[in-house]
Amino acid sequence: MSHISFSELKNWGRCAYYHKLTYIDKIKLFQGNEYTAFGTAVHDVCEKLLLNEDIKPEEYFLSRFREELKNLPKDLEIKKKLAVDMKTQGENLFPHIMPAVDEYFGEYEVVSTEESIMLPIDEFSDKEYNFKGFIDLVLKTKDGRYHVIDWKTCSWGWDARKRADTMIIYQLIYYKHYYAKKHNIDPSMIDVHFGLLKRTAKKNHVELFKITSGKKRTENAIKLLLEALYNINNENYVKNKLSCGSCEFYKTQYCT
């Protein structure tokens, strides 16, 4: 059965032709950099800390970060100063993670970390599709509510424009929708939150904030998902020229 992930949907929203090149033609020009390596390593540390595993966060991070850097494309020239700065930034970040979670949620239990989602998109009837995803963290507080959290590494934080970005918000809407289906939980008992892990912040290194995820927003998110599936299924690959300036395929043999 075919599937679609949020990242694939986001790339379709960016440009349907970009989606074709990356997901249909399987052409990958971007395969990671120092920032993706840092993000992966930090996510792994968060998981270990929340599961209360016996690790030394700084040592574990350095090991994972080095491993991720080694796995980057061989032709990518690593920015050595940036990598060194990131090592220090990661070490400075970890002491703030658990205190921030404890202060924000109070008394809680960890339900799952890196939970996989692979559920049918029942609303789409033209072809069978699953929604695929991985939820960074699910907590349950003493009031019985579930909390879906997605960690995002960033520099100093998010500005108001990014916090209000519909596509960014929809990631958590989909996770909530399909997590509720997977576990047969009333969606009204699930809240969704972003957790910002800030590399360069001087204070408030870890910021958690809630996203509204009511019925109307969920309906709009599902509507966008169905629109994408309809066009993908019908091979409608229209170029969005407004996205050309930030596209790695721009003025290459793949997209002239």
Image (cartoon, rainbow, N blue to C red):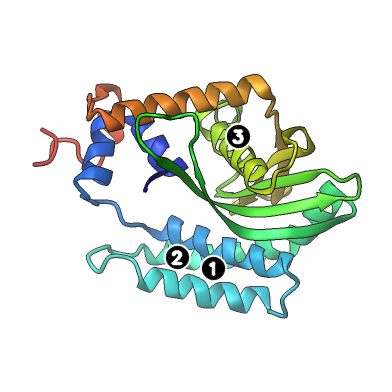
Query: Residue at 72% across / 68% down in the picture?
Result: 51
* Residue marked by disc 1: 87
Q: For this rendering, which residue is in front, 7 or 183?
A: 183
Q: Decide: marks 2, 1 in contact (CB < 8 A)?
A: yes
User: Based on the displayed image, in which of its 4 quarters is residue 245 positioned?
Assistant: top left
Sequence-wise first label, 3 or 1: 1
Is label 2 in a helix, a strand or a loop? Answer: helix
* Separation (CA) of disc 3 from disc 1: 33 Å
Amino acid type at image mark 2: Ala
- x and y, in percent, of residue 74 in the image: 25, 69
Query: Residue at 54% across / 75% down in the picture?
Result: 62
Amino acid type at image mark 1: Lys
Q: For this rendering, which residue is in front, 2 or 67?
A: 2
Is label 3 in a helix, a strand or a loop? Answer: helix
- x and y, in percent, of residue 26 in the image: 22, 50
Camera-nearest label, 3 or 1: 3
* Separation (CA) of disc 2 from disc 1: 6 Å
Is label 1 in a helix, a strand or a loop? Answer: helix
